Amino acid sequence: MITNYNKEFTDYLLDIYGQVEFTPTHGVGARLYDDNNRMVIDFMAGIAVNALGYSHPVLIEALTKQANKIWHCSNIMVNQPAVELAKLLVTNSCCHKAFFCNSGTEANEAALKLARRYGLKSAGSNKKTIVSFNNSFHGRTLFAVSVGGQHKYSEDFAPLPAGIEHGIFNDLSSADELINENTAAVIVEPIQAEGGVIPATVEFLQHLRKLCDKYNAILIFDEVQTGIGRTGKLFAYQHYQVEPDIITLAKALGGGFPIGAILVKDKFAHGFDIGSHGTTFGGNPLACSVGLATVQIINQPKFLNDVNVKAQKFTEYLQQLNDEFKLYQEIRGRGLLIGAELNQAHQNKAKQLMVNGFKYGVASLIASPNVSRFTPPLVIKDEDIELGFTRFRLALQEFSKS
């Protein structure tokens, strides 16, 4: 008997996601199947999480091997997988220390807390302001959602934490107006993913670096969505010739297994000391074992080059479809983080197009009411890119007539 899990979801769980009519039971590579064996080509990868697709044998082996040893231990003990993953991330980044948690929100929360505490210890109680940017997204806790620059996510949860300022993304003069001697940290996404897949300019990020150096503020790059190979480099900051002081990570870091992290430079690492922050499950052996295997696979020159090759193919297919249907006014992004903004005639209809895609067997995302977002597994095969866009063409065709 086939159970209607969509109905049972709303019977037993809080209905806050607005699910589509597809309940996956298993997957292989970039292909997802439901209990009727209906197959969907996945152009979303669990929102840029399943970087190595589904049922990757190396990740299964890493998880199974560790599951037969130890799942969890207190963080007052040292666990080997956490040390190995931290070493791998640190030696391949501009940072020197790592802290593990369970999600991107927790990573940003930790980074912001560290920055506030460092400011207090180094310069006194006035050095506490967090500068973020309009249209940004940094997570769902009250602090993180307040720092995020999308009012729709925070307006119903007042009173919000104080000491947070929002500037204009990619606007140098706006940054000049907000960043000063009282700034504890500046947090920015190299690409505003949830905000519409909007890349930062090189000039903007370099200017933020200069201002943070001038005022001894911590520059935080939120790489929750752009990190771990998504843009064709291990970290997106490597495209910009700018080194942040803290990098926040999650999503692809565990290849689908929940894990988050901050990487921090030595200068600011003593913002935390024993007892100042913590997590029960963060850095557990299962998550770190899978994370280690994931990063080892992705952090190879050929793998990262293949991401860029696939990204070019992906963009070419999307442009060909746009030449035919003329629905998008801009296609943008970097690597396999791609956004396509609907033109004025189709404003606020990106979700409808996403639903159409599932109808024809291809899963995509939205990055705002006007932007279709594509974040396929980094290992997606050429034939699945082709098949996915063959199906997406049908979705566009129906959409264009609506």
Image (cartoon, rainbow, N blue to C red):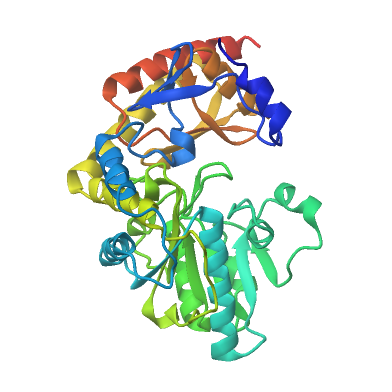
Residue at 68 percent across and 21 percent down: it is: 7
User: Could you tell me which residue is drawn at 53 percent across and 31 percent down?
Assistant: 365
- Quadrant for residue 164, please give it: bottom right
The total number of labels drawn is 0
Q: Report if residue 345 is visible in the image.
A: no
- Which quadrant does the C terminus fall into? top right
Residue at the extreme left: 302
Foreground pick, 89 / 232: 89
Q: Which quarter of the image is occupied by the N terminus?
A: top right
Residue 76, horizontal then vertical, whole percent:
43, 73
The relative height of residue 113 versus residue 287 in the rendered view (above or below) is: below
Q: Residue at the spot x=59%, y=13% of the render?
A: 400
Is residue 245 visible in the rendered image? The answer is yes
Specify the quadrant of the image occupied by residue 329: top right
Q: Position of residue 161 (x, y in %)?
A: 73, 67
Residue 274 percent coordinates (x, y):
48, 81
Residue at 49% x, 23% y is 24
Determine whether 49 is above or below 79 in the image.
above
Q: Position of residue 101 (x, y in %)?
A: 48, 60
Asked if residue 57 is positioned above or below residue 69 in the image, the reply reads above
Q: Is residue 342 above or below residue 194?
A: above
Q: For this view, does 310 lie left or right of residue 2?
A: left
